[in-house]
Image: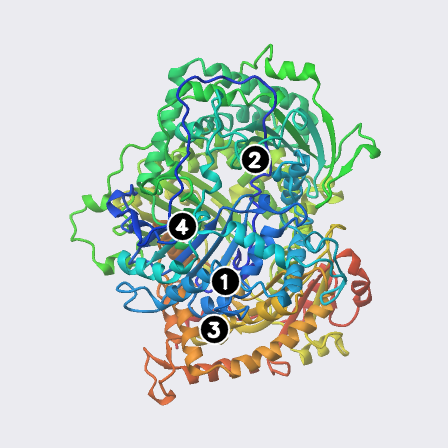
Amino acid sequence: MRIVIRASILLGYWVSASNGFATSFSTPGGGAGGLSGVGRTKFSRPQATVAEQAPTCTTSTVILDDDPDFVKPEPDQRKYRAIRLPNGLECLLVSSPESDVEAAAVHVQAGHMDDPADRPGLAHFHEHMLFLGTDKYPDEAEYEAFLSQNGGSSNAYTDMEDTNYYFSVSPNEENATERTSTALTGGLDRLAQFFIAPSFDPSMVDRELRAIDSEYRNSFTSDAWRNYQLLKSCADQEHPFAKFGCGNYNTLTQGGKIVNSTHSEDIGSLPVDDLLQFWKTYYQTYNLRLCVVARAGLDALQQTVEDTFGHLPPSEGTHRRKTVAAETDEVFSMEYAQYGAPPAFGPDQLRKIRNVVPLIESRVIKLYFATPPLDDPLLKQSRPYRVLSHLLGHEAPGSLHALLNDEGLLTGLTSGVGIDTSDFSLFSLTLGLTPKGMEQKDRVLDLTFQWIALLRDGLADEGLMKAYHDELNQISDMNFRYRENGDPTDFCSRAADLMFSYDYSQLLVGGSSASDYDPVVAKAFLERITPDNAMINILAPSFDGVEDSEWVTEKWYGAKYHVKDMEDEQIREWKHPQLIDERLQLPELNAYIPTDFSLRCDQEPEAPTSDKDEIAPPEVLVERAGLRIWHKMDKKWRVPKTFISLSLQSPSVYRSPRTMTLNRIYERVLTDDLNSFVYDAGLAGCGYRVSGVPTGLRISLRGYSEKLPFLLDTLTTRMLSLIEELKEGPEKHPGLALKFSKAQDNLLRATKNYKLDTPYEIANYNSRLILEESVWYVDNYIDEMEGENAEKDPLTMEECGRVTEECLKGRLKTEGICIGNINAKEAQEVVDVVDTHFLKTSRPLLEVEMPTFRAMKLPTKEEAKKIFGSELPSPVASLIYQEVVFSESEENNAIELLLQAGCDHDLGYEGVAVLDMISHLAYTSAYNQLRTKEQLGYIVSAFVRKVAGGAWSLAVVIQSSVALPSVLEERTAAWLTSFREELENLSPEELEQEAGAVVAQLLERDTQLSEEVTTMWGEILATESLPASMRSPSFGRVERIAKELMVSASCKPEDETPELKSAALLKHKMLDFFDKHFADEAPERRVLSTRVYNHKSRTEFDANVEKPGVLSSYSDIRHLKQFLPTYPVAPYWALKQ
């Protein structure tokens, strides 16, 4: 997977995303399923099939469905057309004139289950190789470079039976609605070449094999990957599901081994011929689907697709989802029709219980039931698994979730189909348990099968089951009706996949609804949810009664497990329990499904919406001491939804690790306590979140406007009454005491599991410990919950109540926003709730009391020598912080090299823009050099990083299984030198295009109401710790940054205007910035290297301990901070510029 860690200049924080040559093997909880020998319902009605005649190639493009044929959500104003090109390729065209992002995706019906037996991982490797050049575009970096120059990116994933390629661009053209943009046209032409003439250059094969191997090793410490591969290893090894999908150097070369980043012990047999054969076999037009979203009209877009993808060689055939069902009297005709015998999970694989020891501390029971593929025609029509999942996972009073939760046994419960292939699926029920729950795992399983038996008995009441079915249809129809357009790239990727499964006119509604309830199909499906058609995996840190010799280690990822057969007597008891706990009851129908979808903007006596109104920021509704509430009634998105966000600022939350810990426990107890009361509201589209952050507590609510007032009142009322009950202690509230204990255990486990994060994530956290003045260390939190100090002074319910009361009723300042389908009167009612529940019992927080966070100023090399008194060990960095990973199975090292560039006050709009421009170019350059060419590691990225307090840096991250951190530093330094040359060699025309790409990304408009809320609320929160003179949000901040980068190659420096700047002058500013902050001898070069070592590399770590300039513990960090100054906190948008 190509992991991209990029900064968000929009909100000023860094995010981690997947972007580039990525691969996913769809591990939603893991799993595989199959068919046992249990009895099944026979079915004598006429059998539905999905058999279709294979389309034939034609001499001209055929329109399959045009825009009037498509069923759309109400807010969707886009135009749609489905076509078949003369070569047989079927395409979905989407005209979206208001979109600032254009995208395309190709979905291929071929995945790692199609790997040849002697080349595990070939489909995945094939996906990688397609990006490394084609006959028309042979340069391996050309595709990504073109997209980057046009404000876009690419990605791909390989799944079990599918591969998906997609890209995006941000066209910076004014007439892109009249004709297809040059950016999209170029992207489509380059992507089309993947399917016309890929080069499969032998000189790149060995190098990219190393990338596959690195990706494989990155997952060694992931329990999700380990558990997923464990299920595959437990399947019948003759079924293609059992294959090792990721692949590694050894499997793909049939025996080759890697020595280091440049040498192999044995190169083995390179799979060049197999790559070409795989491409010829599966990459045929009948087996592909294309989806494109563009600003251009449908006719122009169709012409562009014909001119690009029309050059794919024609082919005729049938993809796997059109498999003709065999003649059968079974209900589910598609089951095992694709691959035939043996089934993935037959009698020899089912009826097993596996004890599994995870890497991170977790306690989980997961039940897997063998079920038919969801593409089976009858399942596709009535979708009985949806009702079953809904009822099994229900959390209202009387449910299995509620019963186990009330007894302090459960941390979470989910259900649904996790694995779905063309000839089988797997329905799973997952129970997260407390330590007490794991001690009583047998009883938990007994209650689980009692719950399943109760549901099976409920099928006899067809009226009730039909009511549940219709209720889910009502919710699905409601959500579809008001569904807003999302990210075009995600849409293309998903739509290209769904094009194989649905009539194009029904593609948008897809699986949002189902046909009428079918009791026969429902009964047949539920008959599969039995213990004799199941496997049970139990994950826990340890197991009693299992000898060391009985443990087995999975071959590829090393999962440790023990397997035993279910006892026949136990199966009979679970299948037909003699007693069902009387507390288990089927849920009532949902009373919180909204019925009022009226829009407030249609009820207000105002003028029609103007373009200015659509993008206008919110306005202050109420402002007084301790309170400021913003409001905006939506007129643009026209959906009956409202968002309410509140920030309750308090200096008491982050006062100490103990107060922060108690607030986090309170957050968990509140969520747990409220769950059974607001669960139905969540199902009906209303949700909430309460979270503790360093500045205080934050409350967010979202959902359909009619029911949101109920949720707000329920939430805020319970927040206060819960505090009183906590203060009264466990003797008076034993049930609450169980929730408190469970919340503390969960928080402790989650905090300790941080140590098993990936090395690059640990490096990021460690650098934050140095860069921010006030930040508590993870061990500080653990000490409050576990160990000697926790035993002496344990956390209690009473203390939790008192501390939270101080945070909510002591000194308080509240900022909030109400936006969406809510008028001023209704927003005022929100203010009244805040007043009643919080402000009337608290006093306004003074400015001097507000939580303020500052950033540390890293030393230059000369300043570091004054601190440490001698030469520094690294020629690259002024400071080094090093740590060894916790897990001995971790094979990767990592570094995060941070080159500090100053603070808001230093940079201003111009400096922030220049840094963003440098980062944009650095990202592609670093990836191409350090990952693609030097193969230092699979995870390589360069991005802008901003920390609390307003300090900005250019960060370079590498995670590597083949090089020590010191080597990664040296190679990064060498890349920086060459990158400076790349900047120097940029022509004005090239810089104009690259800057235009950044501008286009910055100016991308929100695509739905929730995005607008995030944008506006983010700007407001950026001011919450500032004094009154600086608390006006800069809603036009991003536009101002973009203006700094609107350059022209033909504009001379002396002819610059505020609207147009010189590319030559921007280049001069970038080089000056680089030479001041990043160059090797730069006067303001302030560099921190955060190193993370695996256990095999510990020798280098030990050799550096106590060296000058090397920090190896949190106490070293605390000592260093006594010598470092902090930056000013004034934001750049508040400066006079």
Q: Which quadrant of the rendered structure holds the N terminus?
A: bottom right
Mark 2 is on which residue type? Tyr
Q: CA distance from mark 2 to mark 4?
A: 30 Å
Q: Which residue is mark 1?
A: 197
Q: CA distance from mark 2 to mark 1?
A: 30 Å
SS at badge 4: helix
Within 10 Å of disc 3 (Cα), the crowding (few <14, some 14-19, many 20+) is many
Q: Label 4 crowding class (10 Å Cα cut-off): few <14, some 14-19, many 20+?
A: some
Residue 942 position within the rendered picture, expressed as x and y whole percent measured from the top left: 56, 67
Q: Secondary structure at mark 1?
A: loop
Considering the numbered disc 2 on the image, is that residue within a helix, a strand or a loop? loop
> Pointer 4: what residue?
491
Q: Give the mark nearer the N terminus: 2 vs 1.
A: 1
User: To which residue does mark 2 refer?
Assistant: 339
User: As rendered, which of 343 and 780 lies closer to the eye?
Assistant: 343
For label 1, count other residues whose C-alpha is less than 10 Å away and answer few (under 14), some (14-19) or many (20+). some
As displayed, is residue 216 above or below residue 508?
Answer: below
